[in-house]
Image (cartoon, helix red, strand yellow):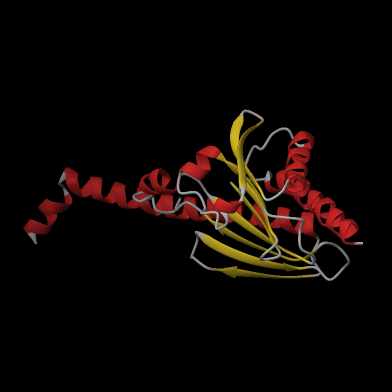
Amino acid sequence: MFEHEQILTQPVFFLFIAFSFLLSFGYFWGRRQNKKLFLSAFNDLVDVVKPDDQTFTNIGGVVGYHTNLFIKKKGPVSRVDATITLLPRHSWLYFPISKIISKYDRLFITLYLKQNPPGEGHLIEKKYAGFRGPKITNEQRLNKETIKWGNHDFYLYYGNLKVRDHFVKFMELNPEPAIIKHIAIVPDQKKGFVFMIPHRTKVAQYFAPIYKWLPSVIKQQGIEKK
């Protein structure tokens, strides 16, 4: 009995209690922050896409969520899928390590196109491409150039000059990439892809111009077929 009372008076015991409290506080704070982030991002997507039906799935506790947005009305896109992966803000022990490894939260958006785009194209930030960026399957068959978008260097990959012109025009109309890291159109898969960092209240602002730009690419392809 005496030995247990002695332990309770040791400074290390109070440090242990304080540390446990801090971790518990961090857990609930981090969960709340991640929930705000994914809700903000997905609500922004819904506001832009205006789907006729939608599903949401938790794929990773408090760090991963997925949504399917279905569109029945006329337009170039039939469905939009999005997956968000968040830094483990709820785990203050692992969070600094994750920050070094993953750097930032990630929002991957896939657009299912009703028609094939006129060719393949990728607009990808140079720093992102060099830091665990995606591997472009047909890179050897695509033209590549470095282009300035805002204050950032991007790689522009394109299968033909018409695709290049579409991307250049988009950059001219939207002079700041901000949270956008990668935009792609892939005719072989009949899909468009967007990768961005999901800052709160920013997803709609930067995804909406892309969603409005895609019809011009598809429309041009339809005109050429006629």
Residue 146: quarter of image = top right
Q: Work out whether residue 170 or residue 90 is closer to the camera in this orientation and state it.
A: 170
> Total marks drawn?
0
Above or below, comparing residue 181 to residue 20 in the picture: above
User: Could you say where residue 63 lies in the image, as x and y percent from the top left?
Assistant: 50, 59
Q: Is residue 195 visible?
A: yes
Identify the image quadrant of the N terminus: bottom left
Q: Work out whether residue 21 or residue 64 is closer to the camera in this orientation and state it.
A: 64
User: Could you say where residue 123 lies in the image, as x and y percent from the top left?
Assistant: 64, 44
Q: Work out whether residue 176 or residue 142 is closer to the camera in this orientation and state it.
A: 142
**Residue plotted at (30% across, 48% down):** 19
Answer left or right for 67 relative to 23.
right
Identify the image quadrant of the C terminus: bottom right
Answer left or right for 31 relative to 224.
left
Q: Residue furthest top?
A: 151
User: Could you say where residue 156 lies in the image, as x and y percent from the top left?
Assistant: 63, 42
Above or below, comparing residue 168 to residue 41 in the picture: above
Residue 202: quarter of image = top right
Answer left or right for 192 relative to 16.
right
Answer left or right for 120 relative to 48.
left
**Residue plotted at (68% across, 48% down):** 203
Q: Is residue 181 visible?
A: no
Q: Work out whether residue 95 or residue 169 is closer to the camera in this orientation and state it.
A: 169
Above or below, comparing residue 27 to residue 172 in the picture: below
User: Could you say where residue 128 lies in the image, as x and y percent from the top left?
Assistant: 52, 43
